[in-house]
Image (cartoon, grey):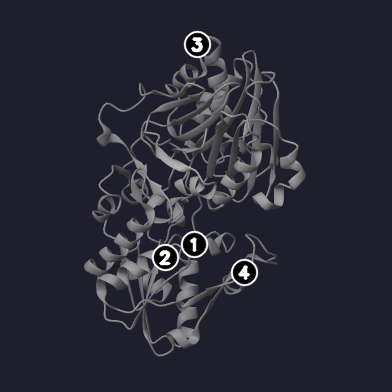
Amino acid sequence: MNELDFDIGGDKLREECGVFGIYDLDGGDVASTIYYGLFALQHRGQESCGIAVSDTEGPKGKVSAYKGMGLCNEVFETEHLEQMHGNIGVGHVRYSTAGSSTRENAQPLVLNYVKGTLGLAHNGNLVNAPQLRKELEYTGAIFQTTIDSEVIAYHIARARIGTPNVESAVAAAMKKLSGAYSLVIMSPRKLIGARDPYGFKPLCIGRRDNAYILASETCALETIGAEFVRDVEPGEIVAITREGIASNREMCLPDPAGEARCVFEYIYFSRPDSAFDGVGVYRARLQAGRFLAMDSPVEADLVVGVPESGNAAALGYAMESGIPYGTAFVKNSYVGRTFIKPKQSSRESAVRVKLNVLKEAVAGKRVIMIDDSIVRGTTSALIVNMLRDAGAREVHVKVSAPPFLHPCYFGTDIPDEDQLIAHGRSVEEIRQLIGADSLSYLRMERLKEMAGGKPICTACFSGIYPIEPPQEDIRGSYER
């Protein structure tokens, strides 16, 4: 699931999206700040991006918005940002797991309704979105997109008509939602943040001078020179106004032990310089590598990581084992997220265009290769073969996650079980398929330790879902 693998046959996982919001109480324009915040979150989604801003002192229905397909620097020109005036705004970067990859499905969503406007950015996946959507359609709702985020926006807008404020409307809508969601919502006079009661996806609060920020990751705060204030708690709704931050915790679980953070934020999704609910991502990855060295030691000459997310775990393995840490792979920094591939059979050339092996680093050596996951196994087999072609005497593969055995319904594109290499196969059978001399995975019981003891979701490994999963695969169901 490395960043180099955006487009090499779908053998790695992707996150759904990243969200960002800011309210400048001094009245300054925020569009350019949102742009840089989204830039810091680009790893969370590369299909589309968007920004919507408004003026809290201006007309209630006036929102300036722009979105498009591609990376932030492909979608936004300087003139786009200069034309977007407003001191409150939300931004979004997207990778689709439910709803097709089209401009119509790009976020933020902007709704005009009787109480004014709503700008909404959503990270996650609802498991009951099809039912909620059908109910709305039978009451006359007309949808412009095929994403579950529009279902959330509709329910908030409808609830707002009968509630005293927008944060109460968000709470009313949350009572109907089931699944994963971190939300950033812009109303005419407030910035709202909300996390689902299980806390699947991250959301944090920051401050820069007299401006408050909501973001998927703490790295976005540092990018814009803001200081971290705290995380939004699972189930919490925060409302940022001129009076400060107000908190509503009525949707928090009675017992925090029932929370279920996505463990893959620690393993892969989040940037290593971020922290998720008080746990540093870099530290968690170092710890995963240390655990691999403790639990499945092997004699070797060199420990290497598959860039980028395998590097920290590889360093942790080297620190624990005493085996030297080194660099075996060179990534082509100038290859974008897509490039021309005439056929699906061109997967091998795609790997080699994005990743090369340093022959002098591995020739004649017994190499331990650390990767963060093996999904279908095709890319792992190619990379093992590349190391052997470069002269590696032995290749031992260590994976800083347990084997994937089940699909995810909460915003990670883990595929159906029959596409997962670990489903129905032993570790030895997988080892033979990828051509490694040995193969070992992180033990399940190590996951919570790695996540600092926080309650986590392990459904993709264990099949134990914190929320009852749908009876059929709902991902992309609106297009069927």
Mark 3–mark 4 Cα distance, whole angstroms, equals: 56 Å
Q: Are marks 4 and 2 in contact (CB under 8 Å)?
A: no
Image coords of residue 325 (percent x, y) = 36, 76
Badge 4 amino acid = Ser
Camera-near label (4 vs 1) is: 1
Q: Position of residue 301 (x, y in %)?
A: 33, 83
* Circle 1 Cα neighbour tier, 10 Å, few/some/many (<14 / 14–19 / ≥20): some
- Quadrant of image for the C terminus: top right
Q: What label sits on residue 310 in the rendered view? A: 2
Q: Residue at coordinates 55% horizontally, 35% vertically from top-left?
A: 21
Q: Is mark 1 on a helix, strand or loop?
A: loop
The mark lying in front, picked from 3 and 1, is 3
| Mark pair 2, 3: CA separation | 48 Å
In depth, the one of 424 and 391 nearer the eye is: 391
Q: Is the Cβ of the residue at disc 2 closer than 8 Å to that at disc 1?
A: yes
Q: Which amino acid, by three-letter code, is at mark 2?
A: Gly
